[in-house]
Image (tube, helix red, strand yellow):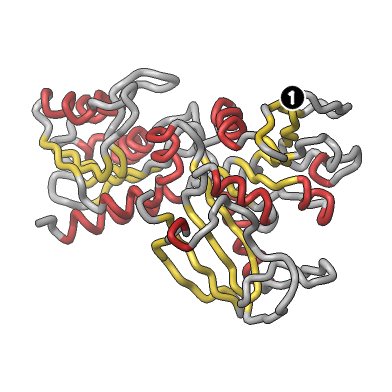
């Protein structure tokens, strides 16, 4: 059984990793804590951005000579390859670390094997401490490696009876100011924010992050199949962040920041869209689109997590949060596992994953 000191150090490493959510793609978020031979913390660090030093290097630099004979706690198995930076397993060996505890094994075949390299050098290696916590914090990158596509979080705000707007189309504001601020946190953690043509026409959304210090602006993506919803002068084209308009292969447009994708039904092929985003280094998507786009993603099996903001409001009429998702009978319903509930202002935020995901 793990000692409390080990748990405390690894939990700190998980906290450190979370500081860089939304800033490291296509790399993972990783945190590292170094303790000296007597168990006192002497260094810590986290991976701050692709191309920069990894978490272990930051922590080793902070620890200096005190790392010799000490323990490194890392949220992800130390890498074993040379890319834009050197292998962290070798850096730990050269620093004289005698024990490495890591939470999650690296599923990337190009970088895995660090644990074996460490053991071969005589370093004591342990895996699995706070694995669930570390995996949850790094779920976007892990999903992208395991499935070959970005992690998709579908966010929506609705009344308690599931309406996202009134019968006349008015929707501002169903959710509380606190919930809307929380959505900006979700945007800051994502590599891309995706909406559809209906949202583009109705709301002229900006999709940039506001109110989050140090946030890296996500790629703003509009799925505009017919190239008819995003017009010159649209807020999403204002330069506050990068923008990409996804259109059909045969659509005509004068816009330049576009990607052409095959059609699927009345829209675009969701797998092709995710492939295109993955090729651009996008590892996490915040799906903020309306009910039609959400239905298309769910029908394609491309939603990994659902975050719903439920307001204590009743409308009784108006569009529902989700349109056709290819479900025709109750036995085909997509069942969810609720992983968190929280009060956000006057609203209830529910986070859930699809069963079996």
Write the residue at 39% across / 39% down.
Answer: 142
The percent coordinates of residue 29 (x first, y second) are: 42, 41
298 relative to 77 in the view: left or right: right
- Quadrant where the N terminus is found in the figure: bottom left
Q: Residue at x 28, y 27 (%)?
A: 112
Q: Nearer the viewer, residue 117 or 195?
A: 195
Relative to residue 199, is residue 129 drawn left or right?
Answer: left
Closest to the observer, 168 or 120: 168
41, 271: nearer the viewer: 271
When asked about the image quadrant of residue 106, the answer is top left
The number of numbered badges drawn on the structure is: 1
Judging by the rendered image, the residue that carries numbered circle 1 is 249
Which residue is more in the foreground, 181 or 39? Answer: 181
Residue sitting at x 51%, y 57%: 306
Q: Quadrant of residue 279?
A: top right
Residue positioned 78% across, 50% down in the render: 198
Left or right: 248 as drawn, with respect to 168: left
The answer to which image quadrant residue 22 occupies is top right
Q: Position of residue 109 (x, y in %)?
A: 31, 24
Q: Locate residue 258, reporting x and y percent.
A: 75, 28
């Amino acid at each position: 059984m793990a000692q409390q000191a080990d748990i405390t150090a690894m939990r700190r490493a998980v906290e450190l990793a979370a500081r860089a959510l939304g800033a490291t793609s296509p790399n993972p978020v990783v945190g590292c804590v170094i303790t000296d031979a007597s168990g006192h913390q002497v260094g810590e660090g986290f991976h701050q951005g692709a191309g920069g030093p990894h978490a272990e290097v930051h922590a080793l630099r902070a620890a200096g000579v005190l790392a010799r004979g000490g323990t490194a706690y890392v949220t992800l198995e130390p890498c074993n390859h040379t890319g834009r930076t050197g292998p962290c397993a070798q850096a730990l060996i050269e620093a004289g670390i005698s024990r490495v505890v890591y939470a999650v094994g690296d599923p990337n075949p190009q970088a895995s094997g660090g644990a074996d390299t460490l053991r071969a050098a005589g370093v004591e290696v342990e895996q699995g401490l706070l694995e669930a916590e570390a995996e949850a914090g790094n779920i976007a990158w892990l999903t992208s490696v395991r499935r070959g596509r970005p992690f998709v979080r579908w966010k929506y705000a609705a009344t308690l009876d599931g309406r996202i707007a009134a019968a006349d189309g008015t929707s501002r504001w169903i959710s509380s100011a606190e919930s809307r601020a929380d959505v900006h946190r979700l945007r800051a953690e994502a590599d891309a924010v995706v909406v559809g043509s209906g949202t583009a026409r109705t709301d002229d959304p900006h999709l940039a992050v506001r109110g989050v210090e140090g946030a890296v602006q996500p790629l703003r993506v509009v799925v505009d199949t017919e190239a008819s919803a995003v017009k010159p002068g649209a807020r999403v084209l204002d330069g506050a962040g990068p923008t990409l308009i996804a259109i059909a292969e045969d659509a005509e447009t004068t816009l330049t920041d576009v990607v052409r994708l095959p059609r699927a039904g009345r829209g675009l092929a969701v797998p092709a869209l995710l492939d295109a985003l993955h090729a651009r280094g996008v590892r996490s998507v915040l799906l903020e689109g309306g009910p039609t786009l959400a239905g298309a993603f769910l029908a394609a099996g491309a939603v990994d997590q659902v975050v719903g903001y439920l307001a204590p409001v009743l409308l009784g009429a108006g569009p529902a949060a989700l349109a056709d998702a290819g479900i025709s009978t109750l036995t085909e319903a997509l069942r969810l596992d609720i992983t968190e509930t929280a009060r956000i202002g006057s609203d209830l935020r529910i986070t859930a994953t699809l069963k079996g995901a």
